[in-house]
Structures are given as structure tokens and as C-alpha cells.
Image: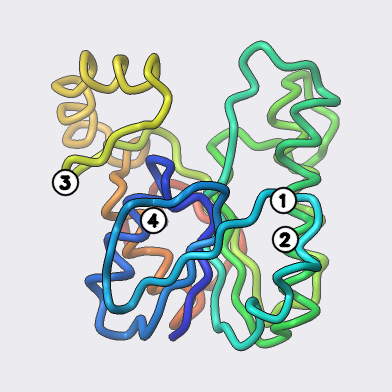
Amino acid sequence: MKVILFGATGMVGQGVLRECLREASVESVLAVGRSPGGQRHAKLREILHDDFFDFAAIESQLAGYDACFFCLGVSSLGMDEARYRRLTYDITLAAARTLSKLNPDMVFIYVTGQGTDSTERGPLMWARVKGRTENDLLKLPFKAAYMFRPAGIQPLHGIRSKTAWVQAIYVVAAPLLSLLKQVAPNYMTTTEQVGRAMIRVARDGYPKPVLESEDINRL
């Protein structure tokens, strides 16, 4: 399986990349990002690309892949809806539309979050935007598309958030996250479990298009 990964330098993306590089069934990984990830591996290749609203300049390098793991995302904190929609919906759909055209047999997996609003009419701005993003991804002509909606995610294996205040929270909350993983497993997962579940779903499929933390952990 040949994989394209967006968001490889983020917390979730780091975990997904780690599992892809360790997994024998993953032949190669193409990481698309704005800055180098800093990793070197025989299976890993990087493309640096500045304009995530237009992928025409690198289209020729995005064909021939079996799966895309889209782990790119931003916090809605302090953003109005128009800006959050541009950085969430517009970027995701720009990539997905390009990939669906080039790779009709591709499986596309998108990381959203628990509480995403599929009706697109709820009171939470971020949930509406994520809901619209999910809904429109599911309409694209991929072989299959899956929405991963983890709740809490515990970073493992030295993985860190690029955002300083988020990383500080994870450091302080580390003991609590470990406890929650034991006592409330349906509401917590790990970067390792997300990565392994993505690989399995891309390879084997899943009975439903939206996966919550419970589904991720079961896989």
C-alpha cells in the first residue's frame, strides 16, 4: 500500500507516520507539507508545498497512491467562522478533490473529532464546519472515505504537539490521560492506535464511514 500523508509534523500525523513506517504492508509514504519533517527513512519521501488551496503544481507527484491519511488541522480557538472554514474545509477539500481525480481507487481517511455536527446546523461553529467537511468528503468519487472522530488522544513514543500551550497541557495532564485510558477507554485513544487503525481501515475497509474512539480502539 502506497500512502499520502498530510499533517505529518502534527501530533496525530507524527503518530500515523510512525505506524506507517513500522508497518510491513505500507510500501511507501509521501508526506506533503509546508516545512521539512526532519525524519529520514527508506520508505519516506517529502514534498514541500506552500499553497494548500491549489495543488496543480504538484499534481504529477500525487498520482498512483492507494490511501490518503489527512491529519492536518487547526484549533478554532480565537477564529471567526469564515477563517476557520477556510483553514479547515477549503484546504481539506482542495486536497481531496485533487486526489479523487488522480486516484479514483484511493481510500481517503480524515481526522475530525468527537462531537462533529453532521447536520451542519448545530450551535458549535467548529462542529458545523467539520460536519460540512465530512459530508462533502463522503460525496467525492473515492473508492471509500472514512471519518475518524477521536475524543481524547494520548501522545505516545515521545510524540509532541507543535503548539507550545497544547504541549504544556499534555505534559501536565499525562497522568490523568493514562488513567482515563484505563477507566474510560471509549473516550480516549492514543496516537499509536489512531495510526494502526487508519492502516487497517485503508487496507481492509470498515462497515461504517464514521469511526468514533471506540471503533478506533477496537481496530
Disc 3 crowd rating (10 Å Cα; few below 14, some 14-19, many 20+) is few
- Dot 2 amino acid type: Ala
Disc 4 crowd rating (10 Å Cα; few below 14, some 14-19, many 20+) is many
Disc 1 crowd rating (10 Å Cα; few below 14, some 14-19, many 20+) is some
Scheme by which the image is coloured: rainbow
Tell me which residue sits at (73%, 36%) in the image. 87
- Dot 1 amino acid type: Phe
Query: Where is residue 161, by image quadrant?
Result: top left
Query: Where is residue 93, by image quadrant?
Result: bottom right
Tell me which residue sits at (58%, 26%) in the image. 75
What is the distance, in whole Å, between disc 2 and disc 1 at their CAs?
A: 7 Å
Q: Name the residue that disc number 4 marks.
A: 216
First reached walking from the N terminus: tag 2 or tag 4: 2
Q: Name the residue that disc number 3 marks.
A: 157
What is the distance, in whole Å, between disc 3 and disc 1 at their CAs?
A: 29 Å
Disc 2 crowd rating (10 Å Cα; few below 14, some 14-19, many 20+) is some
Of the two numbered discs 3 and 4 in the rendering, the one whose residue sits closer to the viewer: 3
- Dot 4 amino acid type: Ile
- The percent coordinates of residue 151 (x first, y second) are 44, 35
- The percent coordinates of residue 21 (x first, y second) are 28, 70
- Image mark for residue 95: 2
Q: Quadrant of the N terminus?
A: bottom left
First reached walking from the N terminus: tag 1 or tag 4: 1
- The percent coordinates of residue 141 (x first, y second) are 79, 77
**Mark 2 and 1 residues: CB-CB less than 8 Å, in contact?**
yes
